[in-house]
Amino acid sequence: MKASQFLISTLKEAPADAEVVSHQLMTRAGMIKKLGAGIYTYMPMGLRVIQKVEKIVREEMNRAGGIELTMPVVQPAELWQETGRFDKMGPEMLRIKDRHERDFVLQPTSEEVVTDIARQELRSYKQLPKNFYQIQTKFRDERRPRFGLMRGREFVMKDAYSFDRDRDSAQASYQVMAGAYRRIFDRFGLTYRAVAADSGAIGGDLSEEFQVIAATGEDAIVYCPNSDYAANIEKAEALAPQGPRPAAAQALTKVSTPGTSTCAALATFLDLPLSATVKSMVLATDEVNDYDEVTKTRVFLLLLRGDHEMNEVKVGKLPGFELGFRLATELEIVEHFGCKPGYLGPIGLKRSVTVIADREVAVMADWVCGANQLDFHLTGVNWGRDLPEPDLIADLRNVVAGDLSPDGQGELAIERGIEVGHVFYLGTKYSQAMNATFLAEDGKPRHFEMGCYGIGVTRLPAAAVEQNHDARGIIWPDAIAPFTLVICPIGMDRSEAVRAAAEQLHDELAALGVDVLLDDRGERPGAMFADWELIGVPHRVTIGDKGLKEGLVEYQHRRDEAATKVGLAELPALLKGKLGL
Amino acid sequence: MKASQFLISTLKEAPADAEVVSHQLMTRAGMIKKLGAGIYTYMPMGLRVIQKVEKIVREEMNRAGGIELTMPVVQPAELWQETGRFDKMGPEMLRIKDRHERDFVLQPTSEEVVTDIARQELRSYKQLPKNFYQIQTKFRDERRPRFGLMRGREFVMKDAYSFDRDRDSAQASYQVMAGAYRRIFDRFGLTYRAVAADSGAIGGDLSEEFQVIAATGEDAIVYCPNSDYAANIEKAEALAPQGPRPAAAQALTKVSTPGTSTCAALATFLDLPLSATVKSMVLATDEVNDYDEVTKTRVFLLLLRGDHEMNEVKVGKLPGFELGFRLATELEIVEHFGCKPGYLGPIGLKRSVTVIADREVAVMADWVCGANQLDFHLTGVNWGRDLPEPDLIADLRNVVAGDLSPDGQGELAIERGIEVGHVFYLGTKYSQAMNATFLAEDGKPRHFEMGCYGIGVTRLPAAAVEQNHDARGIIWPDAIAPFTLVICPIGMDRSEAVRAAAEQLHDELAALGVDVLLDDRGERPGAMFADWELIGVPHRVTIGDKGLKEGLVEYQHRRDEAATKVGLAELPALLKGKLGL
């Protein structure tokens, strides 16, 4: 490829709305162009990256037995009504009407359509297992699209769906996909972690996220440096503290704490570590009847150490929370605690409030909490002596660095990641909702056991940039670079020798299958190098008149500080090594 | 590929709504599955065909200097408002609102977006010419989607757009594309014709359709068997008849023709050839003011020979018809002719009616037309003697087989075709509407000269099937067959020798890069052959135990009447010949 036959379009400045480095650099490098909020054109330079991602995904999906098809972008509402998702999905699912006022959705995923295909096409256990996948445009009408390709509205996803005859087989299919994902992410050349994720109502451990490690990642990843334990923050279990609860040493004391409605303010005021305070979170659950009228509301007091954060996924699994929960209203709080928020605590409560203590709080002694009285807290609080043992002890919190690893192999560490893949065992959730069955070996209909498996094809390049960049621009891994090698001739228009050498090298590398670009635009060296360092092509060969006379050219990897002079005769061997040919 | 790892799903019966053979066969062969009206899943077998079409298109577009990008499916309304197409496009353009009630369209094509990219990215004549293309999902909300992939609502199109500095260069770019299209359609292995098409307001001859020839095609294609003249029916010119108008031989006579309001009925009633009658078409044009109020209406009488059809495209180019025309209302007809439709004619008209005669009518003598009186016609009508010469003589009709070819090389023939590609010189229509300019060599801004070039990627397989099928099913050309060769082992589960031979042949062909499928489903021969003849894989090798003992297998091309016995030793050479390896 020659630059003059391509579109190279770099910008000095990133657009004002580009908050993250991948959005800034991909825009500046001419890889994406914003058309609307969360809607981008994949420009020629960016599309090359996306197509390389697609190719790797396709090869490994096929190798793992996946069967490719393409489901429609515009999907009739009927199937979505069968599973109830037409109503349940929030406004991020774009609903549209055609000219006949019939309802459609722009696919956010395709569980319904693929399950409909399976119930028509897969009639016998003999046809199972099957795994259908597509690489296709998706749309999610994010309330606040941002971060370029990281959280766009229109994007490309590889979504795969497995259909199995029973749970064991489904779990085997899941493991095949998890293995394929490891090969895919290995091939991308990115640092990533497969982390256990919450599998929601399905239960079990069959849900993993593939996270590209990057300091700017939106997700917190928990891992144990001494073992292969890794989970996302929603999933990672905070073990119960070891050892028994210390004995009470302080007397229960009510102290005046005016204007200290947060644990942080309280700890400062009392000159105590934040970890000596206990915060009170008041939640409520509602029971509703068929008319969506609330028939019963229950109020819960959750107690967490002042320095810990509540984990909503864990709280959502508490008994009675299965159908959802909410923060209690101020009215409800006053009704049950006789006090406004900021000074709440578990002592002297009505029996109508269920007290749930985090595992850590349950073993604390001499702690501090609100007195259920404006501007007053209690110190020296102790379970048993000052208040009943909690109604329930549970893991309510996010782990923090230094917590014990659930596998007992040491302490947990936390890093940031960007979710680019997810493998998930679905069970019979969709096959039951859509009555999708096959005839089992005993001749009876049975619901498919399903799994679903996604890769964010257009998010992946953004994650790659977040992980691999420097002050000058992007640094692509070879496997997904828009071009693997760029030839930069200096003064090609003045020197026939430079032109001939550049073109010969271009042709030789192209013949070897190297994705090479010859920059024949005639730009000055500084501008040319700046462009390619911004774009992030990993390998560069510079050919100049002066060097050529001595039989020398220059090689520089994008991560190298400086170029290396190479004899023309040594260049092929050098490049073969660098490019792994 | 082995069948057991793929989805083969054939149907005995076509769905009731499948009117055309490609819809019937592609559905029965398990290539497409209807999800809604005009919305199909491309099933694994069909997607393989589509991907082969895409690959050929991509290779030839790249070879012709096209630069691939991907524009969004969901496009903000603003750009469409700039060109006025947001309002002008009919309801086939699906308009949607996002959660913030902002207007979007699902792309039917992408002229607006690509012109917006060009005006931002192509700043200098030095960057020209450029040709951007995409292979991407389109949506057109057809009023009556039908014929499977032939006229779907969601479909895949390759759309390319060229940008040039001047008309000469644009025409050169157009010719490059026209050449690329010829290579593309040659590679598909289909019988097609590139036909001149109407280029609308732009004028000139720079518009060609690529039509796959098929008896079931929706379009009439006109060509001259003695030359390379070819045009679609809208475009093909009907030459003026040779020789002078014959002298009048009959007297003008008013005859009673009760209940004969059509030319056909009239010709039967009078026992005359239909070609002796002249039909009267009354059209009207409206001038409107800025408030869309009609300020002036003109009425036209168009005269065509009774056996000819009016050509709307040609009529649309008549002077005064540029802004559109319509059929006159019955009220207008009565006002101007004093008679209801069915008995209209050009004699005794008010001067308010402009009379336009087709070239053929202008040289007729002794013809028959309506008398502008209910149940009466005139015979022996002659120009000059009975009525003034027409206000205008023009080509108003579709050509018919046997007409003279416009290039003078013989008579025209007509066949049916399916439009699968279109190349079109756009001029500055979009660049002016969107003020898309570049700096010309003289330093002044200049509007891009544009062209657009489409290929119906998902329509093409349907057209291929319309052209290539028989009673047993589809017959794919090698280049776009879902598989090039299928190996059908007989009794593979019983015979180790058959299994070994089948697998060895599969592996050898796969190693040679042949897209081969081994049917290891264990179906009986009849069912297996019927499947593959329906699916239309062009080459088949059958391996059976009995033959193997004699060292023989069978080869059959999908077009062959019967299989040919081949010695195992001769098979490689035979297949190399058949597959062009």
Image (cartoon, coloured by chain):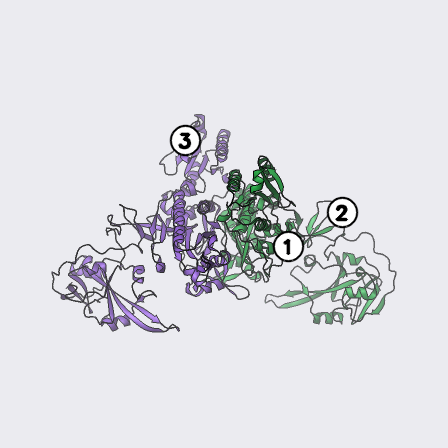
Chain colours: A purple, B green
Secondary structure beneath disc 1? helix
In this rendering, the answer to whether A432 lies above or below B207 is below
Tell me the distance, in whole angstroms, between the alpha carbons under discs 2 and 3.
66 Å
Chain of the residue that carries numbered disc 3 in the rendered image? A
Left/right placement of residue B212 relative to residue A367 reads right
Q: Are marks 2 and 3 in contact (CB under 8 Å)?
A: no
Residue B420 visible? The answer is no
Say which quarter of the image contains residue A92: bottom left
| Neighbours of disc 1 within 10 Å: few (<14), some (14-19), many (20+) | few
Q: Are marks 2 and 3 on the same chain?
A: no
Q: Which residue is mark 2?
A: B408
Query: Of tags 1 and 3, which is closer to the observer?
Result: 3
Query: Of tags 2 and 1, which is closer to the observer?
Result: 2
| Neighbours of disc 3 within 10 Å: few (<14), some (14-19), many (20+) | some
Left/right placement of residue B540 relative to residue A153 reads right
Relative depth, front residue between B560 and B264: B560
Q: Position of residue A225 (x, y in %)?
A: 27, 46
Q: Position of residue A66 (x, y in %)?
A: 46, 49
Which residue is situated farthest in the top direction here?
Answer: A550
Q: Which mark is residue A574?
A: 3
Secondary structure beneath disc 3? helix
Q: Which mark is residue B16?
A: none
Residue A507 visible? The answer is yes
| Residue type indicated by callout 3 | Leu
Chain of the residue that carries numbered disc 2 in the rendered image? B
Q: Which residue is mark 1?
A: B201
| Residue type indicated by callout 1 | Ala
- The tag earlier along the polypeptide, 2 or 1, is 1
Q: Position of residue B527 (x, y in %)?
A: 57, 51
| Number of marks in picture | 3
Q: Are marks 1 and 3 on the same chain?
A: no
